[in-house]
Image (spheres, grey):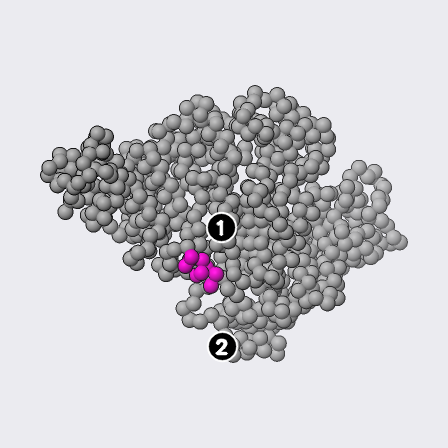
Amino acid sequence: MQVRFGILGPVRIWHGDTERDAGARQQRLILGLLLARSGAVVSQYELVDAVWGSEPPPSATNVLHRSIGLLRRTMEPGLPTRATGSLLTRVGTGYRLTVRPATLDLLAFRDLVTQARRHPDKHTALERYLHALSLWRGVCASGLEPAGRPCPVFTSIDGERSQATRDAADLALTIGEVSRVLPALRSAALPHPLDEALQSRHVRALAADGQRAQALAVYRTVRVRLAEELGIDPGAELRAAHDALTRATTGPRPGAYRSRPAQLPSDHPFFAAPPPVVDRALEIIERQRRAGPAVLNINGMPGIGKTTLAIHVAHRLAAASPDGQLYADLRGVDPTAVVRPTEALRGFLTSLGELPRTLPGDVAALARRYRAVLAGRRVLLVLDNCDDPDLIRELLPGTPGSVVIVTSRSGSGTGDKTLRLDLPDSDEARDLLALRLGATRTAAEPGPVQQIIAACGHLPLALAMVAARAAANPHTPLATIAGELRDGPGRTAGFWSDDAGLAAAFSWSYQRLTPAAARVFRLLPLHPGPDMTTASIAALAGVTAPEARLVVGDLMSHALLELRTGRLHLHQLLRAYARVLSAEDGAGADHRAVDRVVGYYVATAAAAYRCSGLLVTAQPPLSPPGATPAVFTGRDDAVAWLAAERPTLIDIALTADRHGRRRLALHLVTLLRDDPHLTDRRPGQETTGRYVRASLLHRSLGETAVALRGPARVAGPTHPSPAGADPAGAHLSVAIGDVIRDGLAAPHSVRASWEKALAFLRPGPRFSPPR
């Protein structure tokens, strides 16, 4: 197994992917000096001097020999006590550690810097510099300054980093890609506040990136420290950077707002796609860059890892998109919850700095504004779960420089912009399990590993679930787990006729839940909206907050719930599986659970709108029976809750209407109607909040009329009749009056809704609207 070392930061040792303890400080310092010399001989005198300084103890030589022996056995486990091994050898009166670029980050750094300085293409050279600088994790051999004084060899290596950073900054300033080098520049400049050459580049780079205030702050900080610690003024190079900054007249115009969103979810810690797949994705994108927006369409069957690959590739490309990264789950796999083009465009435009009240209402106008805002910018977009080609076209930028990554469950994408993921072969699936469980454990049971892979149908999602269970039970043999998968009761037979491995993995994970968690899992498909919280799950299940936290922890530990950006997500395949289970025990018809979660959201939304000051129309308090709303600490807390829950509130209103809870639905959509983040108040503009409210009100009035008049009267005369001549009309007028008096709708809204409601009754007599 390959041994690797790190010195660009703390001194570290790895055996394969497993980090080993490098020992106490004294032992790590000896290792650091050997690594810093990169294969050269380090004399015994130099090692003793570094560890103990000018007054070493009489036992220094013996202690050194023991430390060398310990290091040898750490590098090569199983080495006899007095054996020298093959890596750390004695040469005369000194020692040499055999390393190469593949095993030592310092040599890899130097190799990349050399490539960067020799490469004729400036953009490729910058890539090499950035790769080299990304290897640093702190100052060289951090925390190991020998005997309280600087170590010349460590200081020299830090100087190599500073020089490479200055070269990269100069190159980035030349080719106009300064934002890409800023993170490395900040990291290198922080531990060297008095390095004027490095700090001058930092000031210039910040200014070139439009961060003038930050550039001035850096200059002032360095000037003060130079005066206080060295008693000198800034040198010529740093003064020149400051003078250029103060003379600059370009930059954002006053009042301009140019947002740089950073919406990418975190990269997966166990990302395991084969390197050729990632390389193919990057190649597809790279060859399109100059012709227009680069588009990568990743498609494949459910659970195969489309989103995981998309997020990983996006993180690889994020530095090349200095104007921001946008992410949206378009929910194309759920026909009842697909994000419409207007919603997606408005969401992206708001993230890019456009004010909601300035946005047009129709799709075409929104698309034109969207492309105008993106013109000249280099952004990265990830459109997750998007099966609608028309929606993709609406969201494509109009100019070159941007990158769009799409994940799609359908196989409709074809051509040279599409990467279709196939099931991993046995070796790739084995690597996925080894990454999560450790190579030692999987290598010890090759037969059961292959049985697990076969039982999971090679599907990465199912393999990940099995691995989560195995990792939580490190003493359970993999043969036992393989047997459970093979001999399971098959409760999900027919769930997916061609995905028996996935069904077995879901069943196996579900059966390990506590009874309380299993009950909640069966209820989760009843929860409206794209995501949920612990509080809303507590309401759905009718349990206390502490009980809900325990249940959520159990579900997450079995990979049945996922936490993303602070919200709990139930994968669409797991939601479908939970529906099968709920149908078996009747949980799918649990109207009490729906009442609880709807009541919680209605009560909490009313409280949030009141606390936030966003409630335009006075509403009477409405407390559904048994509903306990969330408590807000202040306006900011309420505004944050509304920002996170608006998509769910719209789904809650529709759910309440479908289940006959019309009063709650009308109360909620009236709140949404007045929400300035959902409603553009200019005449003629119809937005999500207004559309939902109007549709529910029209439907409720029409159905009320049908109920009051009776089915026999619906097919009555076609000529109008006055309200007083028909008792049903009078009753309907009273019902609508109650709606007005209860504060569920304003009079002008009911009058406008009257004719639309009567469309449900034609042909039949018309009643005069109430005045």
- The label number, if any, that marks residue 249 in the structure image: 2
Main secondary structure of the magenta stretch? helix
Q: Amino acid at mark 2?
A: Thr
Q: Is residue 466 left or right of residue 64?
A: left
Q: Position of residue 271 (x, y in %)?
A: 62, 44
Assess disc 1: are there few (<14), some (14-19) or many (≥20) residues with their C-alpha within 10 Å of its C-alpha: few
- Left or right of 339 in this view: 476: right
Left or right of 450 on screen, residue 45: right
Single out the residue that lies furthest toward the front.
718
* Picture coordinates of residue 768, whole percent (x, y): 15, 43
Circle nearer the N terminus (2, 1): 2
Residue 3 seen from this side:
yes
Q: Secondary structure at mark 1?
A: helix
Residue bounds of the magenta highlight: 364-372
| Label 1 sits on residue | 390
Q: Nearer the viewer, residue 2 or 180?
A: 180
